[in-house]
Image (tube, rainbow, N blue to C red):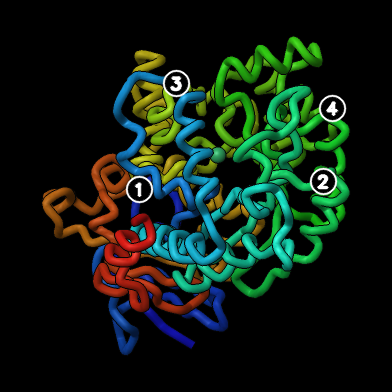
Amino acid sequence: VTVVWCEYAWLGGESLAGGVTMTIDGGTIARVETGTPRGNAEPLPGVTLPGFANAHSHAFQRGLRGRTQRRRGSFWTWREAMYEAAAQLTPDDYLRLATATFGEMALAGVTVVGEFHYVHHAPDGTPYADPNEMGNVIAQAAANAGLRLTLLDTCYLHGGIGAEVEGPQRRFADANADAWAERVDGLRGGPTRRVGAAAHSVRALRPDEMSVVAAWARERSAPLHAHVSEQRRENEECVAAYGRTPVELLADSGCLDERFTAVHATHITDEDRALLGAARSTCCFCPTTERDLADGIGSASALTAAGASLSLGSDSNAVIDMFEEARAVELDERLASEERVNHEPAGLLAAATAGGYRALGWDGGALRAGACADLVTVAFDSVRLANVGADDLVPALVFAAHPADVRNVMVAGEWIVRDGAHLTIDVPRELAEAVR
Ligand SMILES: [Zn+2]
């Protein structure tokens, strides 16, 4: 049993609670009391928040940072560079790169990651001796970094609508949807590890194949994620082939329910929004990547108004900063709508925490009894926050804090970051060596 005393803590809502004593037992928060004296508890200065949920990541794309920012292009030209990076990965390389990338996430206050994983097989498409070799590498990397993991094993069968996988895509593809399901049943969960499903996109799966993935997830009450309408071209191709939008096609295939997450949902119709809202699905916005790839600006407030939940992801890992993902949802929407405060700050913080935990299948992302004991402390004596009064700290955290302000990170009751340093990984050195 660990007892900590938080100078301030965010228990939900627009303001902070002071003098919060938290009792942690067996990886779970057992008790939360406010307005308490410090007593013998371990003091946590600054603000304690539930840990951040990074609900959409492709760890290997961390290797591309800074390498795709020259010469004019589009999402589709970026994808060629991404395929080249994917083509080079060996299991050993990937263990190193994913460990370092997850280490960077830990330092940024991320406590759970949803890894949307599709680099399954050898470069020519042949399964490894253990067909889950790469999935196990991701699980090992998360364990090395101390992160909670939902491994969203991704079904990816076609190179585009009506097209075979080719070149670097071959290593993403299983023989068919049933072979995917059989392989994924070989993956194991654990106290801080869960297996979920992903349908890569309407480009990579036919509707009948999406139905197989949806049924697999439904039978196991597992999270199901899919890339949805990130680019207009995807919508155009989908409507041309099926006479339906991607969201409509996913709905017809039985994918939409409260365990479903539509990643991006950038270019969707009012009808699509109504479908996602009525199903109480989650939309995962990844604003730093959506900017980077010139995808466009989704309307998060219209989605939440329709009944959908919001979560956030660092996706391509071009930057790893959940404060920035949270504020970007609002700030990008301001640019598009010419209106301010489309989202209250506490709602943005909830998207970065509880919204992601829910989408990844965990009872967490909140400082309350019964939740995962995953938390992060943020200093407010840095140059960014030093002048801010306690009453304004929730908005100031969302709009001005930075991963450098993260001091301590706990996952399942165990510290993984203390005083701004990872306890087991020299993250900058590992990143340098892994990317080289
Ligand atoms: Zn993605």
Give the residue type at disc 3.
Answer: Ser
Residue 192: image quadrant is bottom right
Q: Quadrant of ligand 1?
A: top right
Q: Nearer the viewer, mark 2 or mark 3?
A: 2
**Cα separation between marks 4 and 1:** 35 Å
> Where does label 3 land, which residue?
74
Residue at figure coordinates x 30%, y 40% from the top left: 66
**Cα separation between marks 1 and 2:** 37 Å
**Cα separation between marks 4 and 3:** 30 Å
- Which label's residue is closer to the chain start, 3 or 1? 3
- Which label's residue is closer to the chain start, 4 or 3? 3
> Where does label 4 land, which residue?
252
Whether label 4 lies within 8 Å of ligand 1 gets the answer no
Q: Is residue 71 left or right of residue 415?
A: left
Circle 2 residues within 10 Å: few <14, some 14–19, many ≥20: few
- Which label's residue is closer to the chain start, 2 or 3? 3
Q: Nearer the viewer, mark 1 or mark 2?
A: 2
> Where does label 2 land, which residue?
175
Nearest the viewer among 186 and 19 is 186
